Image: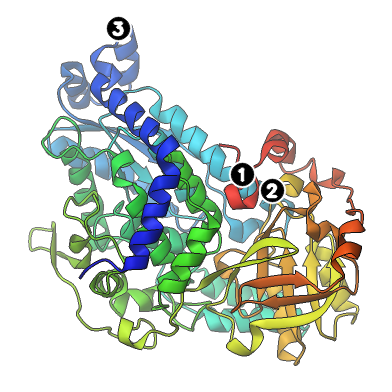
Amino acid sequence: MTLEARIGEVTERIVKRSRPERQPYLDRLRQAAEKKPNRTRLGCSNLAHAFAGCAAHDKAMLKGGVAPNIGIITAYNDMLSAHQPYERFPEMIRETARAAGGTAQVAGGVPAMCDGVTQGYEGMELSLFSRDTIAMAAGIGLSHDMFDAAMFLGICDKIVPGLMIAALTFGHLPAVFVPAGPMPTDMSNTERARTRQLFAEGKIDEAELLEAESASYHSPGTCTFYGTANSNQMLMEIMGMHLPGASFVNPNTPLRDALTRAATNRALAITALGNDYTPVGEVIDQRAIVNGVVGLNATGGSTNHTLHLIAIARAAGIALTWDDFADLSEIVPLLARVYPNGTADVNHFHRAGGMQFLIRELLADGLLHGDVRTIAGKGLDAYRQVPKLAADGSVIWSDGPTESGDEKVLAPIAKAYSPEGGLKLLAGNLGRAVIKISAVKPQHQVVEAPAKIFHTQEALDMAFKGGELNRDFIAVVRFQGPRANGMPELHKLPPTLGVLQDRGHKVALLTDGRMSGASGKVPAAIHMTPEAVDGGPIARLREGDMIRLDAPAGKLEVLVDAATFAAREPVTADLSGNDYGVGRELFRMFRANARPAEMGAGVL
């Protein structure tokens, strides 16, 4: 199918905008590739340090200097359910590499925090900046320059974006991302959300809530709702960084292990020592970035990627903007209904045809660049195939489904749930923000109501418990941006605002903070930029100001006389309480130097 004309137009616009940075990036990549790994030039003492801890066979291979060596960057820890399965992966990778005539070493570990643990608490203020910390930690691991390729073991929210930034910084190396898969389905995400709302209303106690949460998050594997972690997996596959069909195979299964071994063999095959050299800096080009944004819109993915994809693209010398997201959203239909966009979870999505059917439909309608480079080496056509176990325990790929297994979860283009994608750009006299509308019913997508202003999510919660919010309002929760307090996700708010919406009130949220892939049924204008701490228009709002949020039209405005509004002094807030505790002291430099949300909200 011919590429849809507007996809081509947006891509060409990004190509032109990126020229000042992209070409120098590619030049640096190619110069680094010509030098080969540094181990071929290391002094004897240096090299001895590098393999002193290796098994005898690996040590002999590394002495020879001609066998490919994989650097493993792992985000393993056993507190994160999504990352616990990675405990076994390094040895599996080492064994597979040896059998194929190569070697593998764990080059470094990176931190991996769980937003599910920190949400609503102080630790969440470190969450966004952990992305750049992960990138730097991975860079330290790869700086030993011992490697012909890298394998990255990471799944969750800031971890995959941080690893991608690191991979692209070492863009001359082939990079293979290795998922671990989602936990099996237990309590439905819909039932979990209902239980949270009952708790917010005081209708169940903490013991009952904990039982429900424990039934939802019950085993190793990624959380099953379609938040940032699973949006990461979708992106890695549609951008060609996973093996085809690898994203949503459950942990600790024969197929999962076989895919990890296959990923190792593929990493060895695409080094500069062979005939299929595939540096990651050339896999991730402008077309791959556009494919990622298309996939995000087609699935109603996480709003966090309006930050992360911009930062990832920047690491490859590519200038992606919110306007690109908005223009692509107008072109791409919504094809997936996975919680919070529907009642299904990612296991249901996978069984309905998953990434293979999604990519087939988007390719057939000309909505993806099919001629991209991928780690599989065959463009995106290979990603229409489904992995299966062969009799010998290896992986074979066969043609994927031509029809959805469940059109309530995954729709063909002809029966799309919406003609537009799940993400929208909002703009007006308050600045610019993004909103995820795929889970918001049409009757709630336009809200005009007076502002109710808070400087913390705890203050809003107290107002709710005090009975002050039983009316129409738009909650303005400001001083939550990257330079104020690290831009935490405001997860305490959806159950509370959902209760009020269910009572018949018109409610919405406006914030310079984040809501993530868990954004649900209440309209939320997030990532507002300029942020309040920089004196943005959100800091000039006053209690009772009428605000109009019109998601279909992409408008966000305060209905106050322009001269009156401009004459107001921005309010300030005492942020000293965000400066210390649970490690926040260590991130003062990040807060002071963070870029605006529209530029990725990081320091790299």
Where residue 530 appears, as percent x and y from the top left, is 72, 53
Q: Quadrant of the C terminus?
A: top right
Residue under label 2: 482
> Label 1 to label 3, Cα distance in Å?
37 Å
Disc 1: which residue? 129
Q: Earlier in the sequence, mark 2 or mark 1?
A: 1
The numbered dot on residue 43 is 3
Mark 2 touching mark 1, by CB under 8 A? Answer: yes
Q: Which residue is most to the left?
A: 391
Residue at the spot x=21%, y=67% of the render?
384
Q: Residues within 10 Å of mark 2 (few under 14, many from 20)?
A: many
From what the image shows, is residue 441 above or below residue 248? Answer: below
Look at the picture and state if 164 lies above or below 420: above
Can residue 412 be seen in the rendering of this structure? no
- The quarter of the displayed image where residue 477 is located: bottom right
Is residue 474 visible from the viewing direction of this image?
yes
Nearer to the camera, 600 or 235? 600
